[in-house]
Image: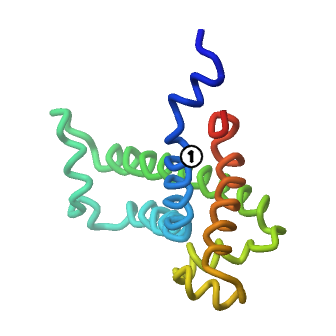
Amino acid sequence: MTSKQDYQNKNKHNTKYYRRQMSKYLSTYNQIKEGIRFKEEDIQNLEKEYFEACPAVHKINKTGVSWTIEDKRKYMANKIKADIAIDKIHIKQMERCLFIVQKEKYYDIIPLYYFEHNTIEAIAEKLYCDTVTVYRNKNALLDKMIVCYFGARSIL
């Protein structure tokens, strides 16, 4: 059995890994929310008259079994619904993480950097602080969000 110290030494890179993951999640947060809306539209479009013209539908026939149009519609709708469910779980978890840090003094760094795509220098100017302060507090906010999203495994 390995000790906690062995585990920490083996996984020292995890801090960078989790920050990179959380940064990726925050950067794509709005696109995933918008993607849910598009997927819901796709489900509605499955009922349109020219259903067979959709390239995604032809990929279903790879099994060699001939499917009816109704079977294809159900299959595609269920596949899209499963994707939406996964996206909604991710969004809900991200919103919980954002809620946890929203009362922090430098919370504005998160929306300014990840949602409005401001540079660190522009954020420092807007918040009347140094760029080092922005970097340090961005990482501190990310660390809090990481624990919320990934749980204890991110800090062990």
Q: Indicate the position of residue 21 as horizontal and vertical percent values.
A: 51, 52
Residue 109 lies in what quarter of the image? bottom right
What amino acid does circle 1 point to? Thr
Residue sitting at x 29%, y 50%: 69
Quadrant, the C terminus: top right
The relative height of residue 100 versus residue 86 in the rendered view (above or below) is below
Residue sitting at x 40%, y 66%: 45
Residue 33 lies in what quarter of the image? bottom right
Q: Indicate the position of residue 86 as horizontal and vertical percent values.
A: 54, 48
Count every numbered label the image shows and give the total.
1
Q: Indicate the position of residue 105 as horizontal and vertical percent values.
A: 81, 73
Quadrant, the N terminus: top right
Q: Indicate the position of residue 59 as horizontal and vertical percent values.
A: 21, 47
In the image, farthest residue toward the right: 103
Secondary element type, mark 1: helix
* Residue placed under numbered mark 1 in the picture: 15
The relative height of residue 117 versus residue 22 in the rendered view (above or below) is below
The colour scheme of the drawn protein is: rainbow
Front residue of 52/3: it is 3
> Crowding at label 1, few (<14), some or many (≥20) Cα neighbours within 10 Å?
some
The relative height of residue 47 versus residue 62 in the rendered view (above or below) is below
The relative height of residue 18 versus residue 110 in the rendered view (above or below) is above
Front residue of 100/60: it is 100
Position of 100 with respect to 57 (left or right) is: right
Position of 96 with respect to 60 (left or right) is: right
Position of 38 with respect to 118 (left or right) is: left
